[in-house]
Image (cartoon, grey):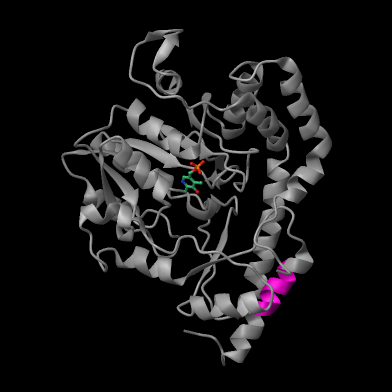
Amino acid sequence: MTVSFLDLAPIYAELKGEIDEAVSRVLRSGWYIGGVECDRFEEAFAEFCGARRCVGVGTGLDALQLAVRALNIGVGDEVIVASNSFIATVLAVTMTGAIPIFVEPDPRTSNLDPTRVAKAIGPRTKAIIPTHLYGQPADLDPLLAIARQHGLRLIEDAAQAHGARYRGRRIGGHGDIVCWSFYPSKNLGALGDGGAITTNDDALADRVRLLGNYGSRERYVNDERGTNSRLDPIHAATLSVKLRHLDTWNARRGRIATLYNAKLAGAGVRLPFVPEWAEPSWHLYAIHTPQRHALRAALGEQGVATQLHYPIPPHRQAAYADLGLPSGRFPIAERLAAETLSLPIGPHLSMEDADRVTAAINRWCTDTSGGNG
Ligand SMILES: *Cc1c(COP(=O)(O)O)cnc(C)c1O
């Protein structure tokens, strides 16, 4: 490919000195679970997010699942999730025995629609999980108001939203508990799997820590049936380094998004919609067109790599066949899945490469006589 979708090697190359020093410090310390590197990162990330507490865990999925469990949500309870989210949001609910209630997104933003959420609440509803999809903040104020009105908890899936802002405030301290992934390709990515929760609720933070550490406060004394899910110090040390560069890297993503917005304005494809209160982290730049397959193939021929986020909505996955939700049940999610196309974006994508992407799309549009569909 002439333009790859996302290359992680330049991230390491840019910070090689700092990362090598952090990793080597952990190796030399002889201390490989928990400890000072984890404490330091948790403090720094909580502060960055404007939250009281951060607790590191093993993965983003674990963060979500432990959040649901820590709120005592389980068998028979209902949890509202977006019908177009990544599978992890749904898995976190079903892993606890709770029932996912899919609610359609606002088709313009691809994020959970508060009006539809209000209508989906029933006597067994316990929580709402908005996903800040593609790093675009969900509309949190109305969701928080609905949650308060009905005595529900707000759990945020912020796995794509490191550094994004909602009404001027960074994601991480709005809802009851906010779940993060440090999967390597995220805006803040580790050298392997990693995750965290942030919250302003000390008791909730302590409960996640307990559940992720065998349900044990004191060694070999188990208060609860927990699991083993912790952020390793080698990742915490690396993440502390990268966190210092996150705003700069997000700004570079923002410049690419601005260039895409300007140069694709006449391309006849639908571009990301950003409400006036949102400052996205631009984890992904997703366009929409009914000719998604043809455009993707044409870009591939011109050496431009693209990806699909996501091609099959959760209710149409074989994994959830037993929910008995037929095709056509969630038309907005199904249409988004059929028409979405993610363009290359990242802190190390050059402006020249971004120009190549827009040129290739505009060429395809001209060749297909306007490209409007
Ligand atoms: C990446 C991601 C997750 C899961 O994170 P892992 O660390 O891979 O478990 C959850 N939700 C969303 C929206 C994601 O993008």
In percent of width and height, residue 216 lies at 41, 13
Q: Is residue 57 above or below residue 351?
A: above
Q: Which residue is at 20% across, 57% downward?
A: 324
Residue 150, x across and y down, in percent: 24, 38
Q: Check the picture and name the quadrant holding the N terminus.
A: bottom right
Q: In the rendered structure, does residue 293 fall within the stretch colored magenta?
A: no
Q: Would you say 117 lies left or right of 295 here?
A: left
Q: Is residue 130 visible?
A: no
Percent x, y for residue 47? 60, 28
**Residue at 64% across / 63% down in the picture?**
344
Q: Nearer the viewer, residue 263 or 353?
A: 353
Point out the residue furthest to the left here: 123
Which residue ends up furthest to the right in the rendered image?
A: 17
Q: Is residue 15 left or right of residue 215?
A: right
Is residue 343 visible from the viewing direction of this image?
yes
Which stretch is magenta?
Answer: 354-360
